Amino acid sequence: MVALVLVGHSPELLRGLRAMLAQAAPAVRIGVAGGTDLGALGTSAPMILIAMRAVLAEAPDGVIVMLDLGSAALALEMALDDLAPADRERVRVSRGAIVEGAVRAAVEAAGGGSLTAVLAASEMPPGRAKLPDDWPADGAAPG
Amino acid sequence: MSGALIVGWLRLAVARIVAERAHLTELDAAIGDGDHGINLHRGFGALEARLAAGDVAIDEPGPLLVLAGRTITGTVGGASGALYGRALLRAGAAVEAWPRGSVVTSALVAAALRAAVDGVAALGRSRPGEKTMLDALLPAVVALEGAGAAGVDLAGALLRAADAAEAGARGTRPLLATKGRASYLGERSIGHLDPGAVSSALLLRALADVAASGA
């Protein structure tokens, strides 16, 4: 089964997201790298590396990494530098929004989706299906 | 470059960052998210603690730089953590590749700084003129390489590099930010110094000062 690694600036945000995922897809393994090594807001390449290695060791089908914003992508790239090539081949990084994307990805992974399928699920446009189709395009309250 | 120079540099860098913490944060508040001084202080403070704990032999410049890079990438937090971490790790790798017992010339140090700066440019997908730390770092490398080629001693070459970095940092004021958080401001980023360029110049000035003191 494909697993997920969540990378973001806030440990609290990712703890909450992990709890949502555990409810939506309890069988899917979720790794988390949130905040710096000292628990401050930010991202940490060493923490991302540890999370990816731990999850990859238990997920032969591979890992989808979900990012929040800004420096998360830079820190991830630093961590990928230190990952063994055989492990790196089993990692895909999503361009999806972290909350919606991770939930969709976890559900797809729980259903046995391939690495490619889980990545595609994670990248569906974030606006899709969040509001009813008849909601005004400018975001104003309907009616 | 001796281990003593690197340890002296990292310790002086911490002191300078503490002294400039409010200024760096104020610069960042103008065009970023207002945490540059706080983040660097946290990261370099963690590095000072690791040096004090004796996590690495202080007479080995390469491993010291690698330790510094790993600590900074794990503790600074923002883009500057990843970028400074990448710079220190690349410099450490370059220094570790020196043959044992090399005479440390300005040309060798210039090559290490070049590796560091190339690492920053590649990770940040950035070029000079985009109002980033590269606007301080790249002129410093060019000055250091020129001094190295002219046979200037290490302390003199690092002085020129620090001068070039400070001039480069001052030169970011009229630039339009196209990278990082400051780019969200568009034209409103014009008229402010780039905090990353200012902290880069601060770090190079600390290195020059330590070299001048004969470490």
Image (cartoon, coloured by chain):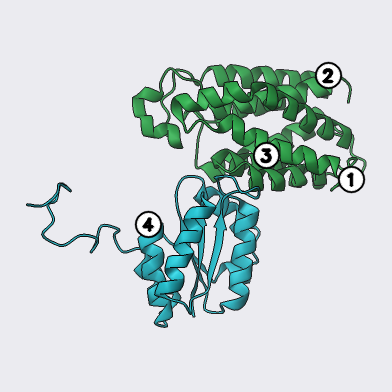
Chain colours: A cyan, B green
Q: Which numbered disc covers residue B57?
A: 1
Measuring 87% from the left and 37% from the top, which residue is drawn there? B3
Q: Which numbered disc covers residue B212?
A: 2
The residue where tag 4 is placed is A97
Secondary structure at numbered mark 2: helix
In this view, the mark in front (4 or 2): 4
* Cα separation between marks 4 and 2: 50 Å
Secondary structure at numbered mark 3: helix
In this view, the mark in front (3 or 2): 3
Q: Quadrant of the N terminus of chain B?
A: top right
Secondary structure at numbered mark 4: loop
* Cα separation between marks 4 and 1: 44 Å
Q: Amino acid at mark 3?
A: Gly
Q: Amino acid at mark 1?
A: Ala
In this view, the mark in front (1 or 2): 1
Q: Is residue A95 above or below residue B5?
A: below
* Cα separation between marks 3 and 4: 29 Å
Q: Amino acid at mark 2?
A: Ala
Q: Nearer the viewer, residue A51 or B61?
A: A51
